[in-house]
Amino acid sequence: MTPAKDTATKAVKKRLNGRNLALVLTLLSAAGLWGTGQMTWLTASVVDDKTGESTEQIIGRVWDAAGTPLALAMLAAMILSFALAPMARRVLGGISAALAAIAGFAAVMLLGGDPDLDRAQQLLTTGAATQKSTDPVQISDWATVVDASVHTFPVVLALLAAACGVVGGVLLAMKPGEARQGHSRYETPEARREGVVEDLNEEPGSGRVLWDALDAGVDPTDREESDKRPD
């Protein structure tokens, strides 16, 4: 393998570490939960003594109102983890995995049993299933939901999205990565300069270290010139 390819391979591996992969999985999970929440999960059969029989559709975010907020909470926890220490990342990873598991609970219940007709009737009677004011989804108080069929495809997709979130959270908890490198602006100027000098000795060619040095008021060229001077 040539040096260029070896460098490229190392760069790819560095980017695909556990923490970045956890973020990607959580992003996919949040997007999947939101997307499937816009799809139809149930079709309810309604009998009304005055208007006769009809069918009404209930989308995912109406049936499982907690799905989208949980997805956003997962995403927020994962993004926050990038600014925290490894131990805090482990905790947030566990929380994110738990949130994803809760987000998938409604899908599991629909796939594993019969739909709750009483809940379907409550959603349709109160008008909670309405998405557009010009196209209300509501039934009368005396109408009855006699049956409901589950749309398997979007429900399975929601379950897979939740599973991605669980894996992402567990991955972050197991591989939180190393402590964040660099120097905080809240350090004293002396401490920052000392840290930057140490970093320059260890990684003189690092772009991050050079920027930290300039930001701390340390001139990297002074060090290079002193190294070149004969003893």
Image: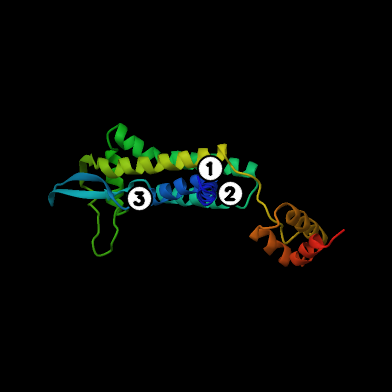
> Residue reaching furthest front?
230
Query: Residue 154, percent across and down?
Result: 29, 45
Query: Residue 189, percent across and down?
Result: 80, 63
Left or right of residue 163, residue 18 in this image: right
User: Is tag 3's residue or tag 2's residue first in the polypeptide sequence?
Assistant: 3
Q: Nearer the viewer, residue 190 or 148?
A: 190
**Disc number lying in front (3 or 2):** 2
Which quarter of the picture shows residue 150? top left
Which quarter shows the C terminus?
bottom right
Residue on which disc 1 sits:
18
Q: Nearer the viewer, residue 98 or 133?
A: 98
Q: Is residue 119 visible?
A: no
Label 2 Cα neighbours within 10 Å, binned few <14 / some 14-19 / many ≥20: many
In the rendered image, the vertical position of residue 111 relative to residue 17, given as above or below = above
Q: Nearer the viewer, residue 208 or 229?
A: 229
- Please, what is the three-letter code of the amino acid marked with disc 3? Arg
The numbered disc on residue 61 is 3
User: Is tag 1's residue or tag 3's residue first in the polypeptide sequence?
Assistant: 1
Query: Residue 28, percent across and down?
Result: 41, 49
- Please, what is the three-letter code of the amino acid marked with disc 2? Ser
**Disc number lying in front (1 or 3):** 1
Tell me the element at label 3: helix
Residue at x 68% of width, y 64% of height: 211
Label 1 Cα neighbours within 10 Å, binned few <14 / some 14-19 / many ≥20: some
User: Is tag 2's residue or tag 1's residue first in the polypeptide sequence?
Assistant: 1
The numbered disc on residue 183 is none
- Please, what is the three-letter code of the amino acid marked with disc 1? Gly
> Residue reaching furthest right?
231
Residue on which disc 2 sits:
81
Residue at x 83% of width, y 60% of height: 190
